[in-house]
Amino acid sequence: MAAAVGLPAARGGPGRPGRRHERAGRVRGARAAAPAATAAALAVVAAVHLGALLAGATTAVHITKPALMPLLAAYVLARGGPRLLVVGLLFGCGGDTLLQTGREALFLVGMGSFAVGHVCYLVLFARHGAAFTRHGAGAARTYRLTAAYAAVWVSVLALLWAGLEADLRVPVALYSLLLTVMALGATRVGPWAAAGGVLFLLSDTLIAGGLAGWPQAPAPQFWIMLTYIAAQYLVAHGLLTHLRTGEEQTKGAGRKPPGPFAARRGRQSWTADRASTMP
């Protein structure tokens, strides 16, 4: 009757499946384009931020800095990355925002925010990375890496110690230890993340050197942010690449890849099976 009088097709009519497929196609296209779009947005904002640092455009610096890590988090989500990585990046955003206030009390809170982010990364490295080998052929590499990162931490802290204010010494020592452990843990998920960990060490050493009164390069904030942005991106990219490689290897072995959202997919499948058996 509805079709006879020229009304739209009734719910479930013959035209609806085509429209549903069109919408599904548009959604798939949007999802496919999302990683490139968020990566491009991150690159633009990072370039503006770094340019503003060189130009001394303080307002642009303060606007763009808190936007960097949310954009990187959006990129991670667009690529289907683990939520804990997103949480770690957002704690990095909290640290960015607090540190740029220039207040000492908020500086320590910002350091704590970064520390929570590092803990998130460490959990991800432990969950998805290759295990450190204490026996056999890989044991020597494990011991060499641990000794090298420990030597870097001790050496840098010793050089910083005398120049740091007394109330910053212990927080800087503890934070730098956590950062060094995170950088060491990043070696478990491949060279990209390992490079990100090293750049994170370099970036925060530049910050600590400023606190300790070390001679500064021209435009020190530019170099701090350049190494920091690269570090966060490489850690995220390295972990995503490691997860994708693991899933591809699992598929090649004929098993369903667990992936970061496997539990949710399993619950959805279980719900769908239950619904199909209901009268």
Image (cartoon, helix red, strand yellow):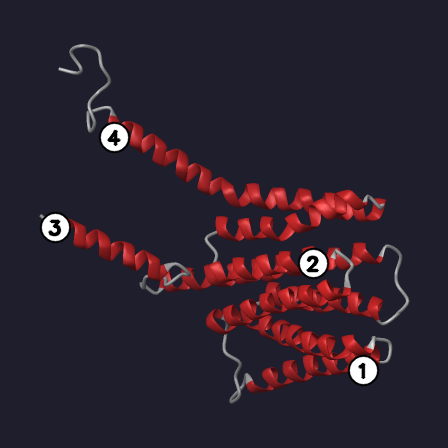
Percent position of residue 22, x then y? 34, 30
Q: Which residue lies under the disc numbered 3?
A: 278
Where 71 sits versus 155, above or below?
above
* Helix, strand or loop status at disc 1: helix
* Helix, strand or loop status at disc 2: helix
Front residue of 140/56: it is 56
Between disc 4 and disc 2, the foreground one is: 2
Residue drawn at point x = 83 percent, y = 75 percent: 165
- Residue at the bottom extreme of this rendering: 135
Give the label on residue 268, or none: none
Between disc 1 and disc 4, the foreground one is: 1
Between disc 2 and disc 1, the foreground one is: 2
Q: Which residue lies under the disc numbered 1?
A: 158
Measure the C-alpha gap from mark 4 to mark 2: 51 Å
Q: Which residue lies under the disc numbered 2?
A: 98
Residue drawn at point x = 77 percent, y = 61 percent: 103
The first of marks 3 and 1 along the sequence is: 1
> Badge 2: how crowded within 10 Å, few (<14), some, or many (20+)?
many
Residue drawn at point x = 58 percent, y = 74 percent: 185
Residue drawn at point x = 46 percent, y = 71 percent: 127
Percent position of residue 184, x then y? 62, 75
Check disc 1 and give the amino acid type: Ala
Check disc 2 and give the amino acid type: Leu
Left or right of residue 154, residue 186 in this image? left
Percent position of residue 98, x then y? 69, 58
Q: Quadrant of residue 274?
A: bottom left
Check disc 4 and give the amino acid type: Pro
Q: Which residue lies under the disc numbered 4?
A: 17
